[in-house]
Amino acid sequence: MARKYHSPSSINTYLRCPRKYYLKYVRGLKEKPSIHLFRGSAVHQALAKLTTSCPAEAAYEEVRDTLLGFFDNAWSARAIEIGNLGLSQEEVQTFYQESVQMLSDWARRYARARQKGLSPPRTEIKLFSSRYGVMGIIDAIYDHQGRIYLLDYKTSKSDEVTRDIQVQMSIYALLYLDKFHKMPHTVSIDFLKPGTIKRLKVTEETLRYAQDLIQEIHQKTQSEDEGDYPCTCGGWCSRDFNLQNGGC
């Protein structure tokens, strides 16, 4: 069997519930769509486009208007899918307005940083490691005064650095080191809704944690036997899919 390539998402899925991993990554079932998924995708798309197109001297208003224009285009492209979710117009509008507010707040912070001389980041960087059998997409990579800073955007309400986030960011650090042979200085999470940034310093321990975890998940996901992937979430995993034969 060819070696699987894991991602932070697939590894976190297994850690939350092996059966959900089985349904998604072994059986290949698609998860039910959600407004959170569509909103997150549109926000990330807008941020990636903004950082490659807005001039350094741009004032806050120009940054904001450009960013919101990108977001409107991305949101409109998903309008039919959002409409099929069965949400009320009021619920959809609430998510839209929340997104506009978080992006406006981010634009203010970004414009201020750019005017102080911060170089724009590389965005949506896809990294693959054949050595570790893992891949990931880093939202933004900043190179400032010889130090590398990795950044990921989150649209969640809370700014808690959960285990999922710790797993994701440690793997990103390992991917960057494996690809560019240089250890990042920090991995950061920009929580857009509360407007806070949490920074995690990259250490040798960070990298060992990622290596050990990746190896463990590779070992535990060799089988394609459903019985090797027990449900540990009380059956909630099955609700994320359109299953013909019921739950766990």
Image (cartoon, rainbow, N blue to C red):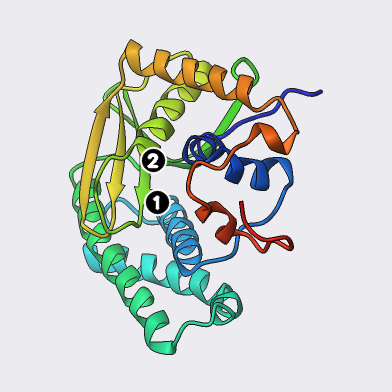
Q: Are marks 1 and 2 in contact (CB under 8 Å)?
A: yes
Which residue is found at the position 51% from the left and 67% from the top?
34
Residue at label 2? Answer: 121
Name the spot of residue 222 as percent of width and height, x first.
70, 25
Which residue is found at the position 33% from the left and 13% from the top?
205
Name the spot of residue 173 as percent of width and height, x first.
41, 24
> Residue lying furthest bottom in this view?
89
Which residue is found at the position 45% from the left and 52% from the top?
48
Which residue is found at the position 81% from the left and 23% from the top?
1
Q: Is residue 246 visible?
A: yes
Q: Which mark is on residue 131?
A: none
Foreground residue among 198 and 157? 157
Name the spot of residue 105 as percent of width and height, x first.
22, 62
Foreground residue among 114 and 126? 126
Q: Which mark is on residue 51?
A: 1
Q: Earlier in the sequence, mark 1 or mark 2?
A: 1
Q: Residues within 10 Å of mark 1 (few under 14, many from 20)?
A: some
Amino acid marked by disc 1: Thr
Q: Is residue 128 visible?
A: no
Q: Is residue 198 left or right of residue 28?
A: left
Q: Is residue 61 left or right of residue 218?
A: left
Amino acid marked by disc 2: Pro
Q: Residues within 10 Å of mark 2 (few under 14, many from 20)?
A: some
State the SS at label 2: loop
State the SS at label 1: loop
Question: Height in image: 171 above or below 87?
Answer: above
Question: For residue 198, what is the image quadrant?
Answer: top left
Cα separation, mark 1 vs mark 2, equals 7 Å
Question: For residue 61, what is the image quadrant?
Answer: bottom left
